[in-house]
Amino acid sequence: MINITEIADMDRRTVLHPFTYLKNYAAGETDPTIVETGKGVRIRDASGREYLDGFAGLYCVNVGYGRTEVAEAIARQAYKLAYYHSYAAHTTEELARLSDRLVRMAPGKMSKVFYGLSGSDANETQAKIVWYYNNLRGKAHKKKIISRERGYHGCSVVSGSMTGLSFYHDHMDLPVSGILRTGVPHFYRGAVPGETEEAFSQRRADELEALILAEGPDTVGAFIAEPVLGTGGITPPPAGYWPKIQAVLKKYDILLIADEVVCGFGRTGATFGSDLYGMNPDLITVAKGLTSAYVPMSAAIVSQKVYEVMEEATSRVGSFSHGYTYSGHPIGAAAANAVLDIVERENLAGQSAIRGAYLMQRLKAEFEQNPIVGEVRGVGMLAAIEFVSDRDTRASFDPGLKVGARISQAARNRNLIARAMPHGDILGFAPPLVMTEAEIDEMVAIARAAVDEVLRELD
Ligand code: PLP
């Protein structure tokens, strides 16, 4: 067996890591964390150090680490049939069962499920389905897709263009044309003095309508959004936001793509974020919680309304010409079924609502009066603390101070993983949905010590 130093050297020489300062890593200024095992809400690295994972990996290991029943389901399927494709109506029992349950679980009137490997590729599929649908309906110009500032939908070519965070575009020739942007529904940051949440939501809906009218409603095909804004800052929508937005979309025959990659399967305290906010999507994107990341799998769930147009066109256009080698991979399907069995049996959506309320109560108690905390927000097992240099003016810190990153690092030094969200000074929490109240207490206490440490440094 090779030792830790050899693994680190090999990694440094050969792995191109996402979101890593390449030169610093290559020069040995930063070290890899060699993750070895995981159990429940904790991971352990090769040196034996254990971390409380307050972000469930990348908000995906919803059922927690080390669930043997998922590992066994994966192994059973691997022994029985490790792979076959799903082209030309090939299927497996696991795939048919998974699709049946997803269509029944999902909000609205869903009809079919198309599978991919990541949230990014599933959103890429959604864009193609929007274009296909409108071509088949004879609306060849109705193609633009509206997304939101600070929305996150992935980092491939079209999904990365839909993402409303500029550092995903810089130096990479994104966004591509045909992707429009509308305002982020963050009340704390966007409201004018004296404005109510309802009035702010109405203003956002009015802006959306103005954009659609300026572009021409016949040129706008879809609106994509996360029920709760995730990577852009873990920001639940203000009161009235979704009904008002949906009224505009309906008026102009614009499809709603609900990106449930983070929210889906219990994260918000409901099965889907769309359930919580009364959304009625035409297309739903899921990934992460679908398999709790035990194996890669994503899906684009297609409503009856959209599917009917696709089916009806068969004699004119032939087969649906879109698919990946690994679409509907049997091991992914087996993992998803085992994970969704746990989600249902342990009522993880309901648990997430209860434990999420406890988490919010604890975070508010510890942080709401803190001199550098502007807002404590969240829903279900999704929460964030936004740091400000001045609570009255809500002024942000100088980005050069890297306050969010330092607090996240101070937490990590105390063996807690809480994510410095990439936009602004925001500390994010999205633990496995199985985290207990005692573990929440431990997480919040460490976060408190980390914030206090950075607060002392800033004084
Ligand atoms: N959509 C949302 C809402 C996400 O949060 C993410 C990833 O964080 C994605 C899409 C992209 O998923 P992936 O990283 O699997 O491509």
Image (cartoon, helix red, strand yellow):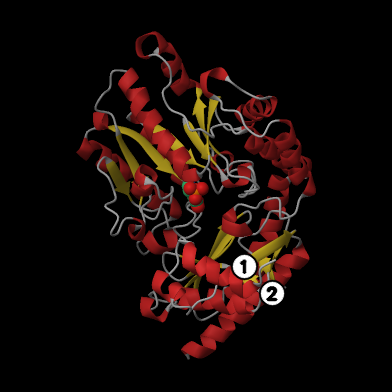
Residue 137 x/y as whole percent: 33, 18
* In-front residue for pair 333/362: 333
Q: Circle 1 sits in a helix, a strand or a loop, which is it?
A: loop
Check disc 2 and report the residue beneath it: 47
How packed mark 2 is, by other alpha carbons closer than 10 Å (few <14, some 14-19, many 20 or more), is few
Disc 1 or 2, which lies upstream in sequence?
A: 1
Residue sticking out furthest to the top: 315
Q: Is residue 308 left or right of residue 51?
A: left
Name the one closer to the observer, 420 or 267. Answer: 420
Disc count in the image? Answer: 2
Residue visible at 32% across and 30% down? 252
Question: Which residue is pictured at 66% across the width and 38% down the height?
Answer: 336
Q: Which residue is mark 1?
A: 34
Q: Could you say which is closer to the camera, residue 148 or residue 412?
A: 412
Query: Looking at the image, which residue is at 50% across and 77% down?
Result: 30
* Residue at (52% x, 18% y) in the render: 88
Mark 1 touches mark 2? (CB < 8 Å): yes
Figure check: 322 above or below 234? above
Disc 1 residue type (three-letter): Ile
> Could you tell me residue 219's position as x and y percent?
25, 31
Please name whichever residue, 235 or 120, is drawn nearer the observer in this view of the structure: 120
**What x and y, as percent, mark residue 429?**
59, 63
